[in-house]
Amino acid sequence: MRIDLISLFPDFVAQIAGHGVVGRAQERGLLALAGWNPRDYAEGNYRRVDDRPFGGGPGMVMLIDPLRAALQAARAADPQPARVIYMSPQGTPLTQAKARALADVPRLILLCGRYEGVDERLLRAEVDEELSIGDYVLSGGELAAAVVVDAVARLLPGALNDAESAAQDSFEGDGGLLDCPHYTRPVSHPLGEVPPVLLSGNHAEIAKWRRQQSLGRTWLRRPELIDREALSKADRRLLEAFLAEHAQAEQTLAGQALAQAAVSADAAQDRGGPGGRASPDSGQGHGPQGESGHEA
Ligand code: 9D3
């Protein structure tokens, strides 16, 4: 697959894409990246690439001609026709399904805007689709393009090694559940223990626990990703058990918080703090003062 980047900072995107999985995909010849800078195609001593917006208002708009020349150069660098995508806050949001579809396209050109955007006539004439990476404001299309390159490159056959690829398959096979928690050595640490089931060697139980964690976390954190009615009976039971346990843990935590608050209030009373007069022997030397480090 070939991806060309049209950008005032083409090296910025290439830099990001030079590491890890995407870098390896390039080394393996699965992905070829090339950058094209509209500034190099701009005319005159000042090599202008932008100008003020007709109708007034803040910011600048990218000029048609330098962008068109850069696009033309990119297209001419390879005879294969390219799909041109404008990275834009007005685009359709990138999803994993979209990334999969793009990974099947042999040639992409990603157009990155800066300033307020690009002259609409260039977009109408040259762009096949507009793509956003989410509802937040970036300073330009470069980081968004890097996200697309990363999401797409790792889907190219041969980009991932076997372990990465197996992990990906199981995730995608899950129909978009969140991942389960992960643990590694040591088993025992001041920050806590590893869940015993993971040390049991019982692979069926481990798979069940992981599935349950995935279901439970997805339900709690991203409820829109789960249709409870559409779950299998087994999944529904796992989720219900998870939620029951979760509610129990919340109860325990709330109980502990209450007990802690009572202890703190007691301590404050002993010190003659708010809520009570100091008793004669108050102050030092007794009681679980501020066990958690915070006092009322
Ligand atoms: C604050 C400026 N906004 C006008 C009120 C419009 C605006 C113009 C240009 C907002 C962002 C940008 C630059 N963003 C992108 O080029 C971009 C982007 C993004 O900001 N968010 C999510 N996806 C993308 S893809 C390209």
Image (spheres, rainbow, N blue to C red):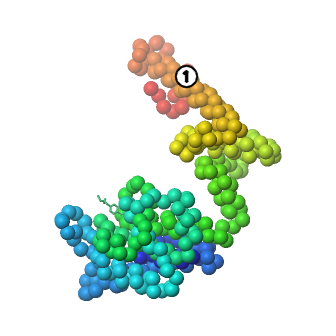
Residue beneath the point at 53% across and 71% down: 17
The residue carrying mark 1 has its beta carbon less than 8 Å from ligand 1: no
Residue 222 horizontal/vertical position (percent): 53, 44
Q: At which x and y percent is residue 163?
A: 71, 62
Q: Position of residue 114 (x, y in %)?
A: 34, 69
Nearest to the observer: residue 124 or residue 274 = 124
Residue type beneath disc 1: Ala
Give the number of callouts: 1
Crowding around mark 1 (Cα neighbors within 10 Å: few <14, some 14 to 19, many 20+) is: few
In which quarter of the view is residue 123 placed?
A: bottom left
In this rendering, position of residue 136 left or right of residue 249: left
Q: Is residue 162 left or right of residue 86?
A: right
Q: Quadrant of the N terminus?
A: bottom right
Per the image, the residue denoted by label 1 is 259
- Which residue corresponds to the image point at 60% horizontal and 27% vertical from the top-left? 252
From the viewer's side, name the closer residue of 127 and 1: 127
Eyeballing the image, is 86 above or below 213? below
Q: Quadrant of ligand 1?
A: bottom left
For residue 154, above or below residue 258: below
The residue at the point 52 percent across, 43 percent down is: 224
Between 72 and 204, the residue placed more toward the observer is 72
Above-or-below relation of 265 to 41: above
Q: Residue furthest left?
A: 56
Which residue does the image show at 62% across and 70% down from the upper left? 156
Q: Nearer the viewer, residue 20 or 203?
A: 203
Residue 142 visible: no
Q: Where on the picture, by quarter, is residue 129?
A: bottom left
Give the answer, above or below, for where 56 lies relative to 244: below
The answer to whether residue 121 is seen in the rendering is yes
Q: Please, what secondary structure does the residue beneath circle 1 have? A: helix
User: Which image quarter is the C terminus in?
Assistant: top left
